[in-house]
């Protein structure tokens, strides 16, 4: 396994209300280093014909290999998707603690797809020792409206 990666990505399907945990592809980590590189690869793999405003489009929240480490400026996350304005890949970056906390929870990224039937905003605490983010999303789905 390549150093610096947690080797897990959470795939959140809002339509199905499910979360699937997958390993980060080893060869992708070598070729597409960092949150932006991995996010762009996932958007490309999703297909060129995907309508940016459709539930088939994905929204990637991705960390790089230094995220959550003691390296300067390592608290960054890339958010990558297909732009409705240009029809190509677009990305944005932000700092703060969310990227490091995602890494400390054991994830290289979260990839959202689908469309929820209703908007539900609920607070949730996720702890790696208690099933992490997957448990958090399962709990939200079980609570109902």
Image (tube, helix red, strand yellow):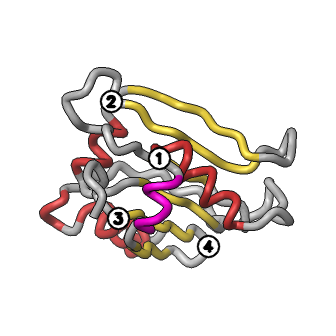
Depth check, front residue: 132 or 77: 77
**Position above or below: 8 against 99:** below
Q: Within 10 Å of the Cα at label 2, are there few (<14), some (14-19), or many (20+) other Cα atoms?
A: some
Residue 95 in the image: above or below residue 141? above
Q: SS for tag 2?
A: loop
Q: Which residue is located at x 38 percent, y 75 percent? A: 142
Using the numbered discs, state the Cα–Cα distance from disc 4 to disc 3 in whole angstroms. Answer: 22 Å
Q: Earlier in the sequence, mark 3 or mark 1?
A: 3
4 or 2: mark nearer the eye: 2
Q: Which mark is residue 74?
A: 2
Image spot of residue 130 (x, y percent): 16, 66
Query: Which of the two labelled residues, at mark 4 and mark 3, occupies the earlier sequence position?
Result: 3
Question: Which residue does the numbered mark 4 point to in the structure image?
Answer: 15
Q: Which of the pair 8/1 is nearer the observer?
A: 1
Looking at marks 4 and 1 on the same chain, the residue that comes earlier in the sequence is marked by 4
Instruction: State which quadrant residue 97 falls in.
Output: top left
Q: Is residue 36 above or below residue 45?
A: above
Expressed as whole percent of the image width and height from the top left, the position of residue 85 reads: 86, 39
Q: Secondary structure at mark 3?
A: loop
Judge whether residue 28 is colored magenta.
Answer: yes
The N terminus: image quadrant: bottom left
Q: Which residues are magenta?
A: 25-31
Q: Residue furthest top?
A: 72
Residue beneath label 3, please?
8
Mark 4, residues whose alpha carbon is within 10 Å: few (<14), some, or many (≥20)? few
> Which label was assigned to residue 33?
1
Specify which label sits upstream in the sequence, 4 or 2.
4
Measuring from the top left, give residue 55's x and y in whole percent: 72, 65
């Amino acid at each position: 396994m390549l150093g610096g990666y947690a080797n897990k990505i959470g795939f959140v399907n809002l339509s199905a209300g499910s979360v699937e945990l997958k390993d980060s592809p080893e060869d992708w980590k070598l070729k597409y280093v960092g949150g932006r590189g991995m996010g762009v690869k996932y958007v490309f793999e999703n297909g060129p014909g995907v309508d940016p405003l459709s539930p088939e489009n994905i929204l990637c929240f991705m960390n790089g290999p230094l995220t959550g480490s003691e390296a300067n400026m390592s608290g960054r996350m890339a958010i990558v998707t297909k732009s409705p304005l240009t029809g190509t890949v677009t990305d944005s970056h932000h700092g703060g603690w969310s990227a490091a906390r995602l890494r400390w929870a054991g994830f290289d990224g979260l990839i959202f797809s689908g469309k929820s039937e209703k908007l539900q905003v609920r607070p949730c605490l996720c702890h790696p020792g208690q099933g992490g983010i997957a448990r958090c999303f399962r709990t939200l789905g079980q609570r109902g409206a």
